Amino acid sequence: MSYSNAANFTNPSTFILLGIPGLEMSHVWISIPYSAIYIIAILGNFTILFIVKSEPSLHEPMYYFLCMLAVTDLVLSTSTLPKILSIFWFNCREIDFSACLTQMFFIHCFVGIESGIFVAMALDRYVAICHPLRYSTILTQLLMAKISLVVVLRSGIVALPYPFLARQWPYCGTNIISEPYCVHIAVVKLACADIRVSSYYGLFALFGVLGLDGIFIATSYMLIIRAIFRLPTKDARLKTFLTCGSHLCAIIIFYIPSVFSSLMYRFGQNVPLHVHVLITNMYLLVPPMLHPIIYGVRTRQIRDRLLWLVIHK
């Protein structure tokens, strides 16, 4: 199927998603790792949810936030990967304008929720290590519910302007998006207008959400490390620090690709397009697959429960 690169419209009825530009002939082969990523993400996160729900000893704040992370990863995967695979398998490149804006909102909203969950997990680690005797009195169910509500509302409010900003611009040139999904900056770049408002808001949201969350997490870990160095023995310090290992790994695989991808949209004009697209795909697709693996391998309670279920079956 051929698609025109230019059109005369102010509000497009559809956009065309290219998938991975320059690698169209390899889409079927590329779909294999993408399918594996989706299957592992779905199975892994549902397994985490099932284990935490079925094991009463895991009904603690840390695992409550882990369940929120699993649900967020499931939404992120499901809002992007089915459409990507339909492009790879069936060459189904068209996406309705409203559907594109809806996907845009879900992507930006749940990326923000995921970032907020990592802040909540950092708070959990801080209280567990710096105030262990007051852990249950500080992190009550009411406080966890309030934190969860703030995380969701903040992300929803910050993400809501994205589709409205994208809808207000006139699109009188190409309707081809060089991505396999709709994100704000990739869509508004197609507008034949001055999009500085959209660009500035995207940078504000990036640094106002991910940037501030990164500062909060870094501050928490500075206090955690200070408390760890006050422990009397090397073994105690190492054992305490390892309780943060899963959280630190999850933060690294989420924040670094996310920030790098957002900056590449604005400043990576000299990067080959297919390389750009593959890199930007990683921050949405890889973390939902790796998070359940990281927590399943590094968290003894989850690992023991999973082994018990397998042996029992």
Image (spheres, rainbow, N blue to C red):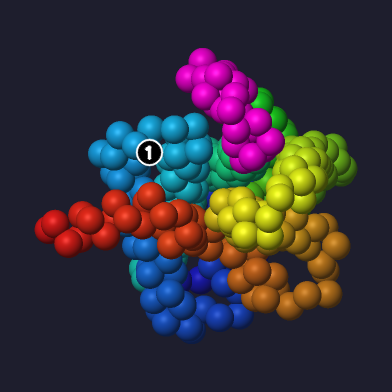
**What secondary structure is the magenta-colored segment mainly?**
helix
Tag 1: amino acid: Leu
Q: Nearer the viewer, residue 186 or 68?
A: 68
State yes or no: residue 150 in magenta: yes
Residue 260: percent from left, percent from top:
75, 61
Q: Locate the C terminus and report the quarter of the image it occupies.
A: bottom left
Residue identified by numbered label 1: 58
Residue 185: percent from left, percent from top:
72, 50
Q: Is residue 51 left or right of residue 96?
A: left
Q: Locate the N terminus and report the quarter of the image it occupies.
A: bottom left
At a point 58% along the width and 28% down the height, the residue shown is 133
Q: Is residue 90 left or right of residue 288?
A: left
At a point 65% along the width and 31% down the height, the residue shown is 131
At a point 49% along the width and 32% down the height, the residue shown is 61
Q: Is residue 157 above or below residue 95?
A: above
Residue 111: percent from left, percent from top:
60, 44
Residue 120: percent from left, percent from top:
61, 35
Q: Image quadrant of residue 100?
A: top right
Q: Image quadrant of residue 245?
A: bottom right
